[in-house]
Image (spheres, helix red, strand yellow):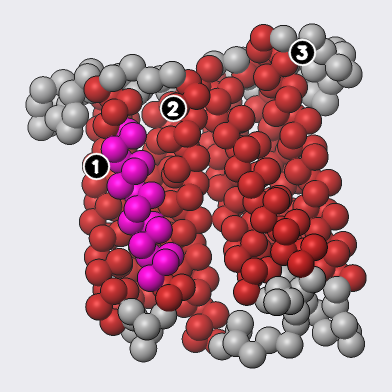
Amino acid sequence: MITTRYRWFAWSTFIGMFLVLLAGALVTKTGSGRGCGDDWPLCNGKFIPAYTVESLIEYSHRMVTGIVGILVLLTFLYTWRYLREHTEAIVYAGGTLLFTVIQALMGAAAVLWPQQPAVMALHFGISLLAVASSMLLVVWIRRHERMDDSNSSTLLPKSMYFMSWGIWVFCYVVVYLGAYIRHLEVEAGCMGWPLCNGQLIPYLGGASGIVFLHRVAAAVLFLLIAGFYVLVRRNETNGEPSKLRKAAMYAILFVIAQIFSGWLLNETIHNEDVYLFASLLHNVLATALFSVLTDLAIRSWKHRIR
């Protein structure tokens, strides 16, 4: 039975994981990763450190992560104790716990030992998986109560199943590229939008090449999601809307918003305050898009033709 307490746990975990991701992005964008020196879990050797902007941002991130980590653990224990017969709930709650632990360990390692940008970008990727898992638990509760996914007559061809998972993997790669660019600090590699440094195809080496690759990948992702939406509509029979139509439409809206937030990043790169807002918005939209695509991939698997 889904109790009010369990709903509270699930929603608190989901919102908390989103805040952890945003706090981590804020640490990165403000260059506060070394705000506590090379100490962990203490900050500059103290439980309550001396005040600086960098130490405040970094230590706040750690505190939020710790509080949310407790919520994640409680949610998993509650799921294991009372909803063990529901495999999906166990997988989602367990996945959130697993990725939260990995995320915390990677954060500690980044403080204690210098990390390459490629490894630091993976930290954001793990955060994405943690947020997506917590979101899936919230969605599962809603659908379980409404019996929304049970006894569905909609069956999807294997082509849609494979395409949805391919888009999910490709989205992860696109987001990872964006995080890599951020940690490499080469956002200015392509000035101007949609052209890159005034060229349709710029010099493909160095910073401009990496940023241009990210832009092209984002455009391809939009085309793939749009194509998947068309397939969803074509697969509808007898005028019955597919259970995937709404999620596919959300994915299109989020990827369009994500592309335009990338434009906003480019336009505000020399305005520090607005650029910080644009960067956080870019992260929020990327997380929302990835979470929706995760749900699409899982539902396509559940409703595939066997």
Residue 124: x and y, percent? 47, 37
Q: Which residue is mark 2?
A: 120
Note whether 245 is above or below 115 in the view shown.
below
Q: Which residue is mark 3?
A: 204
Q: Write the residue at 60% across / 15% down.
A: 186
- Residue span colored magenta: 90-107
Q: Write the residue at 38% across / 75% down.
A: 7
Q: Which residue is mark 1?
A: 63
Residue 239: x and y, percent? 88, 84
Residue 200 sits in quarter:
top right
Q: Which badge, 3 or 2, is on the more N-terminal residue?
A: 2
Q: Residue furthest left?
A: 46
Q: Write the residue at 25% across / 78% down.
A: 81
Note whether 222 is above or below 191 in the view shown.
below
20 in the magenta segment: no
Q: Describe residue 195's horizontal placement relative to residue 10 as left or right.
A: right
State the separation of the CA atoms marked 2 and 1.
Answer: 20 Å
